[in-house]
Image: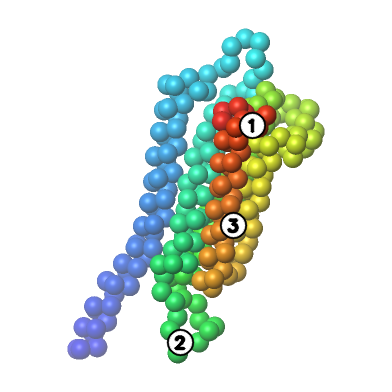
């Protein structure tokens, strides 16, 4: 009878673990959904996605609507990446000295997994954002025959595009290392790299003497 009672007490606890593990993912999905909806409403009623006046080249509605939505995903993923790395670096307790070095601290490992997924999304959204930003600035639709060659010839010469690509590359590097690392020191180093990935975007957007200042602010 005591054994059955213990088994009966263990079952509800075991059943609650899968549900609890979905709560952070549901929270992130909710934040993204609210951000996307708010962006759609704001873009629609602010005129930010309206067709430009006559005589101004237009990349098309796909680019106009996609650019702010991709930025929402980009910003949420970047925030989640840095937050998860900070959690792994500073707030999750480490292993005790008598534990085997081959055993990962479960909560730090979970934080690294979240950082890996978020950083990959950040890198992808950053790369897509570079493409959309160029299309919007150049007024070239994505399907234009000259789009590919124009993008490749300009991506490193225009500051806004260059720093966007650098940010995406930093995010990809963070994701690649976080996928295999579990050490606290690595989490600290990756936090610095991820912070750099965000800082370069801010420096481009507010470089007072830059010829690309207006483009960066509009993007």
Please name the residue that numbered disc 3 is placed on.
Answer: 193
Of tags 3 and 1, the one toward the viewer is 1
- Dividing the picture into quarters, in which one does residue 136 lie? top right
In this view of the protein, can residue 101 be seen by the observer? yes
Determine the CA span between mark 1 and mark 2. 54 Å
Q: What label sits on residue 121 in the rendered view?
A: none
Name the residue rendered at 39%, 46% in the picture: 30
Name the residue rendered at 51%, 36% in the picture: 69
User: Tag 3: Cα neighbours inside 10 Å, few (<14), some, or many (≥20)?
Assistant: some
- Residue 43, percent across and down? 46, 26
Please name the residue that numbered disc 2 is placed on.
Answer: 97
- Residue 67, percent across and down? 56, 33
Q: Residue furthest top?
A: 54
- As helix, strand or loop, the secondary structure at mark 3 comes to helix
Of tags 1 and 2, the one toward the viewer is 1
Nearest the camera: 208 or 213?
A: 208
Q: Looking at the image, is 31 positioned above or below residue 83?
A: above
Name the residue rendered at 37%, 65% in the picture: 18
Task: Answer with mark 3 or mark 2, whichever residue precedes in sequence.
Answer: 2
Please name the residue that numbered disc 1 is placed on.
Answer: 209
Task: Answer with mark 3 or mark 1, whichever residue precedes in sequence.
Answer: 3
């Amino acid at each position: 009878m005591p054994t059955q009672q213990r088994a009966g007490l263990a079952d509800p606890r075991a059943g609650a673990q899968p549900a609890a593990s979905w709560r952070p993912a549901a929270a992130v999905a909710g934040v993204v959904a609210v951000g996307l909806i708010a962006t759609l409403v704001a873009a629609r009623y602010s005129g930010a996605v309206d067709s430009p006046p006559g005589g101004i080249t237009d990349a098309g509605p796909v680019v106009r609507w996609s650019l702010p939505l991709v930025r929402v995903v980009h910003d949420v993923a970047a925030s989640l990446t840095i937050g998860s790395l900070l959690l792994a670096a500073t707030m999750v307790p480490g292993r005790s000295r008598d534990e085997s070095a081959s055993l990962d601290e479960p909560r730090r490992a979970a934080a690294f997994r979240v950082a890996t997924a978020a950083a990959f999304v950040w890198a992808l959204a950053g790369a897509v954002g570079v493409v959309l930003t160029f299309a919007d600035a150049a007024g070239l639709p994505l399907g234009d025959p000259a789009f590919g060659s124009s993008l490749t010839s300009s991506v490193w010469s225009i500051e806004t595009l260059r720093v966007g690509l650098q940010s995406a590359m930093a995010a990809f590097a963070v994701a690649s290392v976080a996928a295999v690392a579990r050490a606290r020191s690595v989490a600290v180093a990756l936090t610095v790299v991820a912070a750099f990935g965000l800082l370069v975007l801010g420096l481009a957007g507010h470089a007072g003497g830059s010829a690309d200042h207006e483009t960066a602010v509009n993007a």
